[in-house]
Image: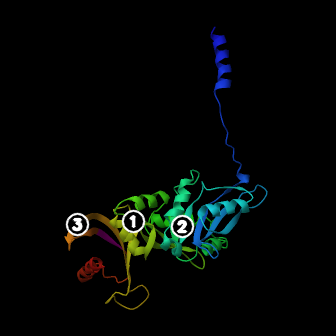
Amino acid sequence: MKKSFKIIASIMCVFILTGCWDRKIFERIGFVLEVGFDKGVRRDLLITSVIPVIDANKKGGTDLLIVDASSMMQAIDTNNRLSSKLLLGGKIQQLLFSDEIAEKGIINLMNVMSREPENSLLAYVAVVDGSTKDLMKAELQFKNKPRPGIYVNQLIKAAVEHSYIPNTRIYDFHIDYFTPGKDPVAPLLKLRRDGIEAMGSALFSGDKMVGKMGIRETMMLIAMQNKQIQDLRAHFENIDKAGSEGNGEHTLTAALKVKKRKIKVVIKNNKPVVNIYIDFSAVIDEYKWDKSDDPIGKKSLRRLLIMK
């Protein structure tokens, strides 16, 4: 009886239970790693995409697709017609926006990306000081850097860990955009002759970029947000009464650590004014004056760090 029951149950499972297998072969897929948005020449947008070439019979390379389009969806369709492989966005590492595009607003472009379930919401959002197309084309020429797309991703991660730039992914940007009383910030990148540099932050009002900040100001912003910061350093140059002349003799570098933060809100002229006070502890990392043990020198240093 038990044996008959097992046989009947097995036969029923064959007809009742179903399964599926969504097989994707790497050699037939184009994984988009990086997407850049610039102002178009003939149309509204110029969109550049980085796609690694995966072929068992060839050495790894990179495909760069550059299309003029009036909308994001039109660019996606054009890319699909240009590519010999099925393009998927699940491995996108970052979305790059030129400062010209960022000033006009980027939320509509990001919404198209986030509505597609295969696209990753963990991709970084960054603003490029200049052309994203030029930056992405230059990535192909860097022989001593990781492959395009991966290089920028590693650069952003390292700069975030050092608190040089904010940690802004697609979902972070959306949360800050839709939160009342809060606006997004994004990393600011710039193409150099032999690489790409993290320059600080791009400031947004809503989804439109309204300003830029350098590294030091970005570190202060991260500290004011009470977020975890690493390697926060302050560099003081051309200090008066620094001692003898020479390279480095007029420079001081101090590592700062946030001890506590205090927020005070007051009403002035019927408008709220928010003051954020941050208490830092400072450790001198580089100091060429050789006066750190002198009581007068210590007093001058304390005054310098407090004033700066």
Q: Secondary structure at mark 2?
A: helix
Foreground mark, 1 or 2, reads 1
As drawn, 18 above or below 24: above
Badge 1: residue crowd in 10 Å (few <14, some 14–19, many ≥20): some
Q: Amino acid at mark 2?
A: Leu
Q: Between marks 1 and 3, how big is the CA–CA gap?
A: 20 Å
* Residue that numbered label 1 is attached to: 183
Foreground mark, 2 or 3, reads 3
**Residue 15 in view here:** yes
Foreground mark, 1 or 3, reads 1
* Left or right: residue 180 compared with residue 46: left
* Residue that numbered label 2 is attached to: 155
Q: Earlier in the sequence, mark 1 or mark 2?
A: 2
Q: Which residue is nearer to you in this view: 6 or 184? A: 184
Q: Which residue is nearer to you in this view: 129 or 45? A: 45
* Left or right: residue 242 compared with residue 42: left
Residue 151 located within the stretch drawn in magenta? no
Q: Between marks 2 and 3, how big is the CA–CA gap?
A: 36 Å
Q: Secondary structure at mark 1?
A: loop
Q: Main secondary structure of the magenta part?
A: strand
Q: Amino acid at mark 1?
A: Asp
Displayed quadrant of residue 195: bottom right
Q: Earlier in the sequence, mark 1 or mark 3?
A: 1
Q: Position of residue 30 (x, y in %)?
A: 68, 57
* Residue that numbered label 3 is attached to: 264
| Residue pictured at 65% horizontal, 72% vertical | 137
The magenta span reads 280-284
Q: Are marks 1 and 3 in contact (CB under 8 Å)?
A: no
